[in-house]
Image: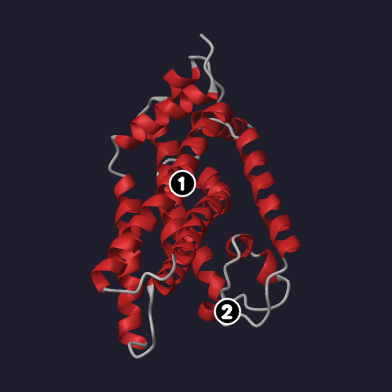
Amino acid sequence: MNVKVTDLVRMEIAKMRRSQILLVGIIALALCPALQYGTHQITAAQEPFAMADLFRSVIWGNVQMFLPISFVMIGGFVISRETSDDTLKSLLTVPVSYPMLLTGKLMAVGLLSVAFGLYSCAVTLVTGCAAGLEWGSAAELAGSCAQNIAVSVITYGVTMPLIVLFGGRPGAYLGGSIAAFFCGYSILFFKNGVLRSVYPFLAAFALVGFDTAEFNGAKVNADIGFSMLSMAVVWIAAVLLVVSARPPERRQRRSARIGTGRARS
């Protein structure tokens, strides 16, 4: 029986649709526009605030907090549940290699990142309409939606190494989501210099043409070349992690053999 990556992707999408873990991203992305609008009303209610402003705030909030946490938690869960549900042994006898299995899962979450981008656009529009914000021009609105979708996909790419690292250890995806939160929150502190361009989460902004000066006080524009190089390094690291990954049970057996050998010596 020949199993293709596309078969694994379809299987994973079907499994995710039945999983409540998706509620993490659904609720988080729904809260982001309301939180950003509420923050503006509290801190700067006298300043103009249109639909485009809400979209910029949502893009910033998503990359800083909501998307990294959602992707690492969901991605780590769909990887680790094969071990916790004791289904990994059956999958590996199909036969399908563990790196191929990881590839199918990561591609499924990659498609989810597109869906999350579209969903974020929808809830932002609904929030803006409920708040009575001015829509602006159609071109401006389309550009904001395109940025929102693009930054969702790129942010997923940034979090892939974290997903593979923490997803390969049963239950560790919760710790991975905490690590993702700190990684995303750190974009507040890189305002100048090379780190402004190479820090992966800020590089995601640069690649979609998003100016972060309004939110973290950056004094200089990011260098697109450095940002592209940073993203390439992240993606290469993710590929290497997938290729070199081994099933958790195999790592446990190896650790047990090493421990036995040491005990005998």
Residue 20's image quarter? Answer: top left
- Left or right of 94: which side holds 223? right
Residue at 59 percent across and 60 percent down: it is 208
Residue at 60 percent across and 33 percent down: it is 258
Q: Is residue 12 above or below residue 33?
A: above
- Residue 199 is situated, as x and y percent measured from the top left of the image, at 64, 65
- Left or right of 80: which side holds 153? right
- Residue 56 is situated, as x and y percent measured from the top left of the image, at 46, 70
Q: How many marks?
A: 2
Which residue in the structure is indicated by mark 2? Answer: 213
Q: Is residue 47 above or below residue 201?
A: below
Q: Depth check: give the residue in front, 239 or 40.
A: 40
Which residue in the structure is indicated by mark 1? Answer: 114
Q: Which mark is residue 56?
A: none
Query: Amino acid type of disc 2?
Result: Ala
Q: Earlier in the sequence, mark 2 or mark 1?
A: 1
Residue 141's image quarter? Answer: bottom left
Query: Amino acid type of disc 1?
Result: Val
Can you say which quadrant of the picture contains the C terminus?
top right
Q: Is residue 211 above or below residue 28?
A: below
Q: Depth check: give the residue in front, 260 or 75.
A: 75
The answer to whether residue 170 is visible is yes
Q: CA distance from mark 2 to mark 1?
A: 26 Å
- Left or right of 240: which side holds 152? left
Residue 97's image quarter? Answer: top right
Q: Secondary structure at mark 2?
A: helix
- Left or right of 112: which side holds 107? right
Q: Secondary structure at mark 1?
A: helix
Q: Is residue 235 above or below residue 224?
A: above
Residue at 32 percent across and 71 percent down: it is 35
